[in-house]
Amino acid sequence: MLYTLIGVLILAFIIGRMIWRRVPSEKQSEIKRLIGYGTIAGFLATCLYDLSRFILIKVTGFQFWPFDIFGIFGKALAGEQATGIWVSMLGAVFHIANGTTFGIAYTVAFGRKGIWAGLVWAMILELAMVTVYPGWLDVKALDELVSVSMTGHIVYGVVLGYTARKLILRKETPVHA
């Protein structure tokens, strides 16, 4: 998985660089601004996604623990024989980077659209996740997985849609001395 990820990242970088060179410089500055806003919105949305899932589990007493995925991601990146807390930390960093990157993509493509577009984006991510995870992870508590995941993605979509739009449309107010 690690070599595949590295290969995909290198290919994406090369393709992105080729496209970027064709973008007019005035448009490049706008895209850079959107990437910055998307980084903020995506990171915040990912943090609140995880917080909402944690709160839901504590309130409902669900047995499904979604944060086990960090160790699975870490092993997928570092190798099945990898052990230790660093493996879960690597997986958590991957998870945060993944959520942030989806936030950047959303902000660049749809950031001005607001909460409803953020929710649609999050539901597309939710659909992809519930299509892949149950078979890949051999999930037993499927109802709990869907409930926890759906809640997290709703929060992610609302926060992403609201924050991206707010950052893009905010008015700079002059500071009076």
Image (cartoon, grey):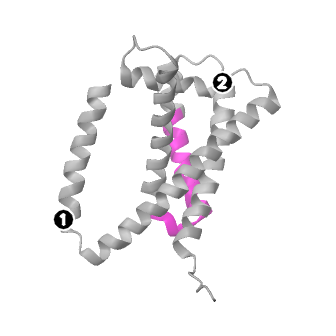
Q: Looking at the figure, which quarter contains the N terminus? A: top left
Q: Label 2 sits on what residue type?
A: Trp
In front: 62, or 32?
32
Please say if 135 is above or below 131.
Answer: above
- Mark 1 or mark 2, earlier in chain: 1
Q: Is residue 126 magenta?
A: yes
Q: Residue at x 65, y 24 (%)?
A: 65
Q: Residue furthest top?
A: 81
Q: Residue at x 46, y 29 (%)?
A: 90
Q: Residue at x 54, y 50 (%)?
A: 43
The reply to whether residue 108 is visible in this rendering is: no
Residue assigned mark 1: 21
Residue assigned mark 2: 65
Please say if 124 is above or below 41.
Answer: above
Q: Residue at x 45, y 35 (%)?
A: 94
Query: Is 13 left or right of 40, judged from the image as shown?
Result: left
Q: Residues within 10 Å of mark 2 (few under 14, many from 20)?
A: some
In front: 113, or 175?
175
Q: Position of residue 62 (x, y in %)?
A: 75, 25
Q: Position of residue 158 (x, y in %)?
A: 64, 56
